[in-house]
Image: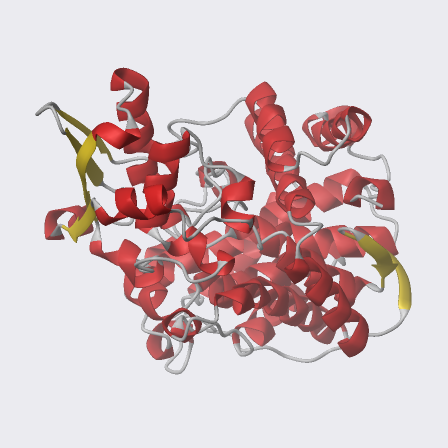
């Protein structure tokens, strides 16, 4: 009798905890931690962060020891919920090509909350985060592009990943780990209808609820509740009911490959990851030819169709829509020479010069580009100048993808750029704390995330 792929996956997670971690994986984990803290710090002062902290305090009241970005410590469930939402506000949290989700917010947020509430060694924290990435990304890859067109996979596959991360952090045995994922799968949801209805401000609730439900699922399994066994592949599992069309072999295939954590993308731009390749192509043209914005006759952007299903805002009407508007981000980059956090938080959406340039940005899709999706995200940018010159660049992969990664100093510089309120002392302390996860001699040290690391 063959086992369900989900059972094989649970066994794989259990086995991962008993084998040495490759140095490359340790290094990549440290990078993932620094990326997560960068995302959280960058959003500390946003109105959305205040709203998330207030929501958590009202719906999950009670004092606790788990730090929260920019606020007082809370009990673990509230802290996991809040930090996942805050770290997603800026759209700079990590991403993944094939799984089409943000793994760090669902894998790291619950583990940091649990580590602050109960003593656990750094190796267990590492194992838990790696397990969260492994499950979220494998499930997301299996669900595929049709699912990702209708559902926010950070909320669906991410919920299962959050449960796996929480279960490993709690030290649950393999059977209960499997139950935790099955329970979480029955509670996973996240409709892209919020984009169609211009409710972009609520997108941060998707990872927040995923973490809340994933953590609760792990506790439920620990308390003895059983979970769906074939939670992805069953007759009424995620794949059948949530429009799955990806390779189911992603669930239990290539178990000898490096951990899925190593395949995530660290984002170079403060906007939706669907728009990165056109931005990278525009940046390439700017670096090579330095076109003056006022001398541009037209900008033609050809992109894969799936991008506009999520990032299809023609022109933003509010700050929350700026990360999802291709015309806005390209026009801003061309006119200002950069695209920073402030351009997303406090945009001048009525600037005559910016509007005039944006009107000259023409967007179209190419079915051939879609055929390469999601493993590649092709985009071609062609800039025609008023003097007749033409510049073109094609990008298929994104800066920050595994094939074009950031190094540690670049990630530190990125952190300071995305979190300018951070002092030198805070940046140094945070960098050293994250870097410790790359040091195998620290595996038995207690992991104690302090409030200072969260901006308190």
Report the front residue among 299 and 433. 299
Q: In which quadrant is the N terminus drawn?
A: bottom left
Seen at 67% across and 34% down, the residue is 420
Percent position of residue 50, x then y = 72, 61
368 is higher (above) or lower (below) than 158? above
Quarter where residue 329 is shown: top left
Report the front residue among 47 and 163. 47
Seen at 60% across and 36% down, the residue is 418
Viewer can see residue 420: yes
433 is higher (above) or lower (below) than 358? above
Q: On the rendered structure, is 177 left or right of 384?
A: right
Residue at the far left: name it. 388
Rendering colour mode: secondary structure
Quarter where residue 21 is shown: top right
Residue at the far bottom: name it. 236
Quarter where residue 251 is shown: bottom left
Residue at the far top: name it. 288
Report the front residue among 172 and 238. 238
Seen at 73% across and 72% down, the residue is 55
Report the front residue among 254 and 391. 391
Residue at the far front: name it. 352
Q: On the rendered structure, is 319 left or right of 192?
A: right
Seen at 77% across and 29% down, the residue is 423
Viewer can see residue 168: no
Percent position of residue 241, x then y = 36, 79
Q: How many marks?
A: 0
Percent position of residue 450, x then y = 86, 43
Percent position of residue 192, x then y = 40, 70
């Amino acid at each position: 009798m063959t086992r369900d792929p989900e059972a094989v996956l649970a066994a794989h997670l259990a086995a991962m905890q008993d084998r040495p971690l490759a140095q490359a994986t340790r290094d990549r984990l440290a990078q993932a931690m620094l990326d997560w803290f960068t995302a959280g710090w960058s959003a500390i002062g946003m109105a959305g962060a205040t709203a998330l902290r207030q929501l958590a305090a009202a719906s999950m009241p009670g004092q606790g020891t788990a730090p929260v970005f920019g606020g007082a410590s809370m009990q673990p469930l509230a802290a996991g919920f809040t930090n996942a939402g805050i770290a997603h506000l800026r759209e700079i949290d990590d991403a993944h090509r094939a799984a089409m989700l943000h793994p760090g917010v669902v894998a790291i947020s619950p583990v940091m909350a649990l580590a602050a509430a109960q003593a656990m060694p750094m190796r267990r924290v590492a194992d838990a985060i790696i397990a969260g990435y492994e499950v979220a990304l494998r499930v997301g890859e299996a669900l595929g592009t049709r699912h990702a067109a209708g559902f926010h996979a950070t909320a669906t596959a991410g919920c299962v990943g959050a449960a796996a991360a929480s279960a490993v952090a709690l030290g649950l045995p393999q059977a209960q780990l499997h139950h935790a994922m099955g329970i979480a799968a029955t509670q996973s949801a996240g409709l892209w209808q919020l984009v169609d209805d211009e409710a972009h401000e609520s997108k941060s609730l998707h990872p927040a609820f995923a973490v809340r439900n994933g953590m609760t699922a792990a506790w439920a399994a620990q308390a003895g509740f059983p979970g769906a066994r074939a939670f992805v592949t069953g007759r009424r599992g995620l794949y059948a009911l949530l429009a799955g069309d990806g390779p189911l072999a992603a669930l239990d295939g290539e178990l000898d490959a490096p951990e899925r954590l190593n395949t995530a993308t660290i984002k170079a731009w403060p906007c939706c990851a669907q728009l990165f390749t056109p931005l990278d192509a525009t940046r390439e043209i700017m670096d090579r030819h330095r076109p003056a914005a006022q001398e541009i006759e037209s900008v033609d952007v050809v992109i894969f169709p799936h991008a506009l299903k999520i990032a299809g805002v023609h022109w933003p009407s509010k700050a929350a829509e700026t990360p999802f508007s291709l015309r806005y981000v390209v026009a801003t980059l061309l006119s200002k020479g950069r695209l920073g956090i402030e351009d997303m938080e406090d945009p001048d959406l009525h600037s005559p010069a910016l509007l005039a340039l944006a009107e000259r940005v023409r967007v179209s899709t190419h079915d051939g580009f879609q055929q390469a999706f999601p493993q590649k995200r092709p985009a071609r940018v062609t800039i025609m100048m008023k003097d007749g010159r033409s510049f073109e660049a094609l990008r298929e992969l994104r800066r920050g993808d595994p094939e074009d990664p950031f190094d540690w100093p670049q990630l530190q510089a990125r952190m300071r750029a995305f979190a300018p309120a951070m002092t030198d002392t805070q940046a140094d302390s945070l960098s050293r704390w994250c870097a410790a996860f790359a040091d195998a001699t620290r595996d038995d040290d207690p992991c104690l995330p302090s409030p200072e690391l969260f901006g308190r």
